[in-house]
Image (tube, helix red, strand yellow):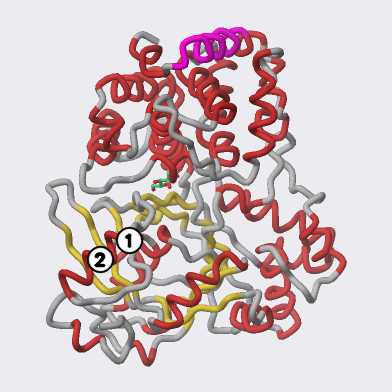
Amino acid sequence: MQLNKQNLTAFAGKLPCPDYDRGHLQTGIVHIGVGGFHRSHQAYYVHQLLKDGTPEWGITGVGLREGDRAMAEVLQAQDGLYTLVNQRPNGTNSSEIIGSIRDYLLAPDNPDAVIQRMAHPKTKIVSLTITEGGYNLNAATEEFDLTNPDVQYEIAHPQEPRTVFGYLAAALRKRKAGGHPAFTVLSCDNIQHNGNVARRMLLAFARHQDPELAGWIEKEVTFPNSMVDRITPVTTPEVSEYLFREFELEDGWPVVCEPFIQWVVEDNFVNGRPPLETVGVQFVPDVSPYEKMKIRLLNAGHSVLGIPGALHGHPTIDACMRDKVFAGFMRAFMDQEVTPILDPVAGIDLEAYKDQLEARFANPNIRDGVGRICSESSAKLPKFLQPTLRENLRRGGEIHRATFILAAWCYYSDQRHNEKNEPLEILDERAAQLHRAAAGTTTDPISFLRQESIFGDLSEQPRFVEAYTEAVRLVYDRGDVRSLMADW
Ligand code: CS2
């Protein structure tokens, strides 16, 4: 039976379903970028909250790109409903139907509907998961990239937004004109100081498009920083098959997740916020130490396993963790390169946090593919790994393993197949550029590093260049990353 609001009562005896009146939900939050992560994390927290009766905090999902059409079709057919399957390490699962997304708008179909909804006085928060690459940031200059053709178009045509910045500006302009208070922009991406980055990028955009609006945004909009965490693998067809077998439930795009969940947010909301503390969200005055710890350990730890894992032929993160060489390499990276530069985090024992990360990565029921981890590495590594490397260069710390991972990434981008000679599907907006740069390594060992928009000035740092040149030579000579990692 198809998952939708008519059929919900038929599922109620089989698995937990929304027991609140979805007919009376209003949109308090517009969320841009509804993928697996938003649905396993924020929408799940809001779903818990709605059980306590706060119907003004329903979510309208928004997709800005043509690529979001598949999500639009599924969620529209299912009245915003979907199933979340929590996969425990002991092999058991628990499934629940989530009801917090009350509707979904695909911007390319009706840009005005999206602007209207964001501008509606009942919308108090616009939250974002637009990925590390979505902030339109030039990694070398750390500035807003004005050369982006979509951005240039929006600056010339403010009524025809294309990117998240164009939509935010259009909606805020409407609120300002209508005399309505602004909304909070809540970034939920894995970027350190994600709120500050969102603010800086939106202001840079608005200054070019509409300086008066920029002044208003500066005064009226808040951008809390937040740290988000829940491992959410790509949904495979087996998940839908499982739900059909188990509950006779047909869900076009369910979500899988691990049991762990965490959200730490700065309490800086200009137009009210839901009482999320009642469902486990932590509100703090300064999220910096939490986000630094999470991004530098968890997200970087994923890449430290995933890139050599893909080259070696390990299909998933848990498979990497079962390989003692990989697990040992990652823990040494965390202990020797990351831990020394982390700030103390109130209430968190770092050793226990790292032990817990190892256990989460090793969850054999989660099967988080290395392909997901390696995707968009050109946007991820400048945020997850390079800041650690740079900080260690500055203070004379250990850079050994981070350097190895960059050399392995070069080899991965160059070879495009693994050590078993199977093709690697490289999902990266800059895949062609990465390949060209990597292919130059045999004649110029630091050819890969010369991509300034990814590595900034790293190719001019003698200590790093020396270490990288040696690492890349060994990786190319041996072509077997695992044996190198064993005694790296
Ligand atoms: C992963 C994240 O792809 C990645 O970079 O590290 O998606 C990670 O699983 C989440 O941030 C977990 O909270």
* Residue farthest along the front direction in this orientation: 421
Q: Is 221 placed left or right of 212 in the picture?
A: left
Distance of label 2 from label 1 (alpha carbons)? 6 Å
Residue at 39%, 56% in the rendered image: 283
Q: Residue at x 59, y 38 (%)?
A: 378
Q: Residue at left 80%, top 66%? A: 154
Q: Is residue 289 visible?
A: no
Q: Is mark 1 within 8 Å of ligand 1?
A: no
- Residue at numbered disc 1: 237
Give the mark count.
2
Q: Amino acid at mark 2?
A: Glu
Question: Is residue 368 on the magenta stretch?
Answer: no
**Based on the displayed image, in which of its 4 quarters is residue 432 positioned?**
top right
Magenta residue span:
466-479
Q: Quadrant of residue 181?
A: bottom right
Figure check: 278 above or below 406: below
Discs 2, 1 touching: Cβ within 8 Å:
yes
Query: Closer to the camera, 197 or 364?
Result: 364
Nearest the viewer among 179 and 75 is 75
Prevalent SS, magenta region: helix
Q: In terms of secondary structure, where does tag 2 sit?
A: helix
Q: Secondary structure at mark 1?
A: helix
Q: Is residue 48 visible?
A: yes
Q: Circle 2: is it few (<14), some (14-19), or many (20+) Cα within 10 Å?
A: some
Q: Where is mark 2, residue-wise?
A: 241
Instruction: Say few, some or many: other residues with alpha carbon within 10 Å of mark 1 (under 14 / 14 to 19 / 20 or more).
Output: few
The stretch drawn in magenta includes residue 475: yes
Residue 420 place in picture, x, y as percent: 39, 27
